Image: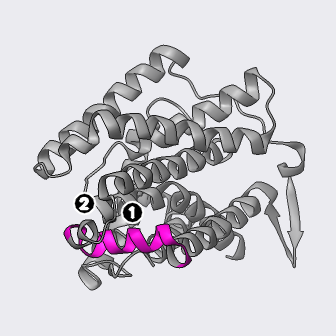
Amino acid sequence: MAIVIFDGVAYGMLLFLIGVGLSITMGLMNFVNLAHGSFAMVGGYAASALMGRLGLGFFPALAAAFVAAALVGAVLEFVFYRRLYRAHPLDQVLLSIGLVFVSVAAFTWGFGPTMQPFSLPSWLEGQLTVGSIAVGRYRLFLIVAGVLVLAGLLLVLGKTRYGAMVRAAVDNQRVAGGTGIHVQRLFFLTFSLGCGLAGLGGALSLGMLGLEPSFPLKYLVYFLIVVCVGGAGTIAGPFIAALLVGIVDVAGKYYLPEAGAFLIYVFMIAMLLLRPHGIVPRKGLT
C-alpha cells in the first residue's frame, strides 16, 4: 500500500508540474487553453533532443525545456491568443484545439510517430530504500521537484510585486489597469510563465510517461481534471487535486485494473458535486 501511495504522489506531482501553468492562465485570463499539453510537448522534445543529440546535461536540458516552451508560448500569445481574450469561449476552444492538432502533425512530421528516446542520469536510476520500502529514485526526484515548484510559485505570487499585480488583475482587471498596471503585458508574462512550467513538466515526463506526438491529446483530460477539481486560478488547489488524481489513478490500476481510467472520472464527478468551485475556490493566486 505504501508503494502505491508513493507512486501515486510522484505521478500526481508530475500532473501538478504540467497543470499548474494552465491553472494560472485560466485563472488570470479566463482563457480556455486546450493547447496547454502542446507546450508541455515542446519542452519534452526540446529536452530529449538536447540531451540525446547534443549531449546536454540533465539540469541544463530542463532549463532549456522551460525556456523553449515559454518562448513558443510568448510568440503564440502575441500572434493569436491576445486577439481572443474577450472572444466567446467557443472561439477560444476552437483556436486552442486547432493548435493541438497542428502541433501533433508538426512533431509527427519532424520527429516521427514513435516514442522519444530518453536516458536518465545514472544517479536517478534504480531504487532507494526509505524506511522499509524501496522507492524509485526518479519518482522521489519528481516529488522534490514538485514541492520546490510549489514553494517557488507561492513565494513569487504571494511575496513579490509581480505577484501582487497578478492578484490584482485576477480580482478586477479594469481596476488593476486604472492603478497603472499594464494588464496586457502582465498577461503576456504570465502566459509565458505558464507555458514554461508546462515545458518543464513535459521534460520531466520523459522519464515516467514517455513522449510521443499524441501526448497533448492523450493527457489533456488529466490536466483539465487537475485544474477544474483543484480550482482554476489557484496554486494550492491543483496541487491537492493532482495528488488525489495520482493516487486514485495508480491505486485503481493496481487494485482494479479492469476498471482502467474509469475511477478517475468517478472521482472527478464526485469532487465537482461536493466542491463545484474547486477544492480551493479562487481568492487570488494563493
Indicate the position of residue 128 as horizontal and vertical percent values: 88, 63
Q: Which residues are magenta?
A: 159-174
**Quadrant housing the N terminus:** bottom right
User: Is 48 situated above or below 272?
Assistant: above
Indicate the position of residue 196 as horizontal and vertical percent values: 53, 47
Mark 2 nearby-residue class (10 Å; few <14, some 14–19, many ≥20): some
> Residue under circle 1?
23
Which residue appears farthest toward the front when viewing the image?
180
Examine the image and state in which quarter residue 67 appears: top right
**Labels 1 and 2: the sequence-earlier one:** 1
Mark 1 nearby-residue class (10 Å; few <14, some 14–19, many ≥20): many
What amino acid type is highlighted by mark number 1? Ser
Residue 267 in sight:
no
**Quadrant housing the C terminus:** bottom left
Measuring 71% from the left and 33% from the top, which residue is drawn there? 118
Left/right placement of residue 194 relative to residue 175 reads: right
As measured in the structure, the alpha-carbon distance from the residue carrying label 1 to the one carrying label 2 is 10 Å
Secondary structure state at the residue bearing disc 2: loop
> Residue under circle 2?
30
